[in-house]
């Protein structure tokens, strides 16, 4: 009788251990999917996206050869456009079912992601997203948010960024701007006062994510050059 109860107890413990192991493997598997499969898909998207921009820019340069002294700053050519289509009427690019408004590349942390139009749980588990503002590469401030999973995915490594680091943002109108980080700080999750700010006629971006213990928001300001 005693051996029977002992055997049942061992069976229950064994089942609990197996379930715990399967749960851990499932969690690690999802984390691995995020870190590798999703990042590889995002990198391939960004490479194709920026290659199209570079090819079009090369064609335009060949058609309109000008001297260096007459070449305009990329910022000077920015015009108000539709955030999604870029005002061209062309097909909206998508990534895993979400509309894309541009791409972001940060060489210092090896970050390459499409910027999604919609902000919700599913989109933020897929990439980074445009939250608020003038529009990607438009004059004014644009807020881009992403999760910090503390595994290198999305904005997990933003804490490693420093003043002066470079960020490249390309939009659907085929504008590719270079931004330089000029301010980095932490604030409360409720603070949004800095979303609307005077950028003195220059495109700016704000990167927002959680700090490592999710108690605060890590905020980064960058200005187009």
Image: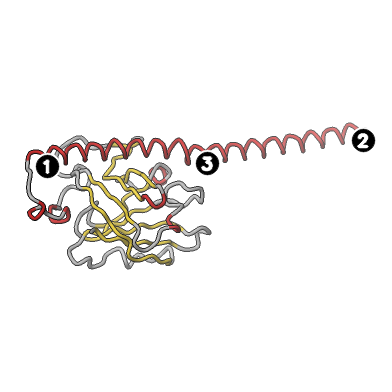
Local packing at callout 1 (Cα closer than 10 Å; few below 14, some 14-19, many 20+) is: few
Image position of 199 with respect to 152: above or below: below
Please tell me how crowded label 2 is: few (under 14), some (14-19), or many (20+) other residues with Cα within 10 Å: few
- The tally of labels here is 3
Q: Position of residue 151 (x, y in %)?
A: 51, 48
Looking at the image, tell me whether mark 2 or mark 3 is earlier in sequence order: 2
Q: Please tell me whether mark 2 or mark 1 is closer to you in this view.
A: 1
Residue that mark 2 sits on: 2
Residue 35 x %, y %: 48, 41
Alpha-carbon span between mark 2 and mark 3: 43 Å
Q: Quadrant of residue 1?
A: top right
Q: Position of residue 23 (x, y in %)?
A: 62, 38
- Mark 3 highlights which residue? 31
Q: Which mark is residue 61?
A: 1
Q: Quadrant of residue 47?
A: top left
> Which part of the image, by quadrant, shows the C terminus?
bottom left
* In the image: residue 223, left or right of residue 220: left
| 3D distance between C-alphas at marks 2 and 1 | 87 Å
Name which residue lies at 17% across and 38% down.
Answer: 56
Tell me which residue sits at (27%, 61%) in the image. 223
- Mark 3 or mark 1: which is in front? 1
- Pick the residue in front: 76 or 197: 76
Q: Quote the CA–CA distance across marks 3 and 1.
A: 43 Å
Mark 2 and mark 1 in contact? Answer it, CB < 8 Å. no
Say what secondary structure mark 3 lies in.
helix
Q: Residue at point 48% right, 59% down?
A: 211
Badge 2 element:
helix
Q: Secondary structure at mark 1?
A: helix
Res. 194 image quadrant: bottom left
Q: Earlier in the sequence, mark 2 or mark 1?
A: 2
The one of 20 and 177 positioned closer to us in this rendering? 177
């Amino acid at each position: 009788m005693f051996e029977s109860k002992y055997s049942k107890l061992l069976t229950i413990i064994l089942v609990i251990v197996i379930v715990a192991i399967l749960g851990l493997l499932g969690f690690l598997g999802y984390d691995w999917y995020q870190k590798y499969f999703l990042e590889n898909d995002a990198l391939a998207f960004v490479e194709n996206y920026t290659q199209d921009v570079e090819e079009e820019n090369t064609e335009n340069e060949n058609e309109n050869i000008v001297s260096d002294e007459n070449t305009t700053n990329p910022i000077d050519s920015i015009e108000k456009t539709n955030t999604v289509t870029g005002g061209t009427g062309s097909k909206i690019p998508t990534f895993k079912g979400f509309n894309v408004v541009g791409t972001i590349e940060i060489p210092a942390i090896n970050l390459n992601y499409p910027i999604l139009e919609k902000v919700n749980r599913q989109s933020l588990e897929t990439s980074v997203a445009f939250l608020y503002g003038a529009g990607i590469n438009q004059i004014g401030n644009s807020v881009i948010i992403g999760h910090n999973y503390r595994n290198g995915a999305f904005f997990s490594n933003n804490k490693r960024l420093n003043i002066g680091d470079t960020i490249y943002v390309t939009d659907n109108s085929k504008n590719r701007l270079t931004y330089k980080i000029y301010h980095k700080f932490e604030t409360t999750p409720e603070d949004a006062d800095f979303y609307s700010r005077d950028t003195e006629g220059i495109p700016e971006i704000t990167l927002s994510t959680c700090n490592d213990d999710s108690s605060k928001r890590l905020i980064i300001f960058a200005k187009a050059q």
